[in-house]
Image (spheres, grey):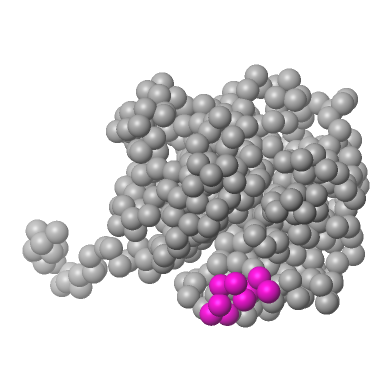
Amino acid sequence: MSAYAGGLSCPRCGFETGEGDWYRGCSECRSAGRSVNLHPRYDLDGISYERDDDVAGLFRYGSLLPFPDGADPVTLGEGGTPLIPFARLAADLGVGRFLVKDESRNPTWSYKDRLAAIAMTRARAVGADTVVVASTGNHGAAAAAYAAAAGLRCIAITIASVPLTMKVLMQVYGADVVAVDDLEGRWDLMRSGVAERGWVPISGIADPPAGSNPWGVDGYKTIAYELFDDLGEVPDIVVVPAAYGDGLAGIFRGFKDLVALGRAARVPQMVAVDPFGAYAAALVQERPVVVERNPSVAFSIATPIATEQGLIAIRQSGGTAVGVSDDAEIMAAQQRLARQGIYLEASSAIVLPALRRLVDAGTVGAQSTVVAIGTSSGLKDTAATAGRLPPVMVIEPTLDALDQALATR
């Protein structure tokens, strides 16, 4: 039995609405000058926390996901990603346990697949024929793949500067991909398609940003469920790379479900990390504010403004936010993680220097269990990594030549 009660509600003011008017977020908050994403409503009375391992992908948690009983899931086997402990990094950082939830193991190599699986299930169930997404890569690749699995047309609007790999991933799954030079222009184009042609948005269209497709956001709840299943408890701290706060909000909502269902006594502290300190500034100002934006190697999360849904997750969990702007520091973290055996995108590796700051500030205790969400694979942007590695030497096939080459390292 599904706990989804139909309709949507605002996490800030509690306003409730039906399923038809959700594109721009909460209308009540918008009239008060706030841009807030809506979230699906649930009735957890009589619902037990159960996992059906006979069901593929994250739909094993179907009773806690936002679609009615009998809906036909769109799945490519997403979810069930490994939680990997890194004891040496934990010792170096000075925490009790440091683990990475490796979301690069999903079908399109990022945690966006969780959002796309639920959003496409919903889109197909309501009879959509075309979906649209504005993305720098990960979101677009996931939307393209799951639209293909659902038999839907996908329009992906990106920016010209994203790595070739990102464009290829969107195109190869069959999406109609276009790029624009104007960052804000892609949102205008997307809004026009939604308003005039009835396309279903998979990413957000509100301005200021509120977050993505609200049903899709709840796909991230399954990360919380999996962490609880793997650890047998909730961690102390969960560190999430954050742009518009979809993952941050969704994971937090999953932990809230566990508390409401009596499985967990508390939620972990949620920590948002971004390159420009947008979430840290929002905490200080008590609302999202625009911060200075510059080019960043962590382009997937390079937002100049936080969202209300992300800010709510931080506040209600007693968490915090960290900005890490130094590209060299981020790429050094990527290499450090890779030397432990996990190759994450720069936008994921950013969690490591953020955690160092929190430990140094005394925000994270020496006995804490810390989980970092490894949101995406480093294979999405190998050029950025290669630029910080020595060239591969071409040598004669002799041991003497090999020794000479190794001696130059």
The spot of residue 31 in percent (x, y) is 77, 54
**357 or 161, nearer to the observer:** 357
**Residue 162, above or below 40:** below
How many numbered marks, from 0 up?
Answer: 0
User: Residue 322, can we see it?
Assistant: yes
Residue 387: image quadrant is bottom left
Residue 6 highlighted magenta (yes or no) = no
Is residue 186 within the magenta segment?
Answer: yes
Rendered residue at 43%/54% (across/down): 275
Q: Is residue 285 above or below residue 146?
A: above
- Range shown magenta: 180-188
- Assign the magenta stretch its main secondary structure: helix
Q: From this viewpoint, is residue 175 visible? A: no
Residue occupying the point 57% across, 37% down: 314
Residue 162 percent location from the top left of the image: 49, 72
Quarter occupied by the C terminus: bottom left
The location of residue 116, given as percent across then percent down, is 70, 57
Residue pictured at 65% horizontal, 58% vertical: 209
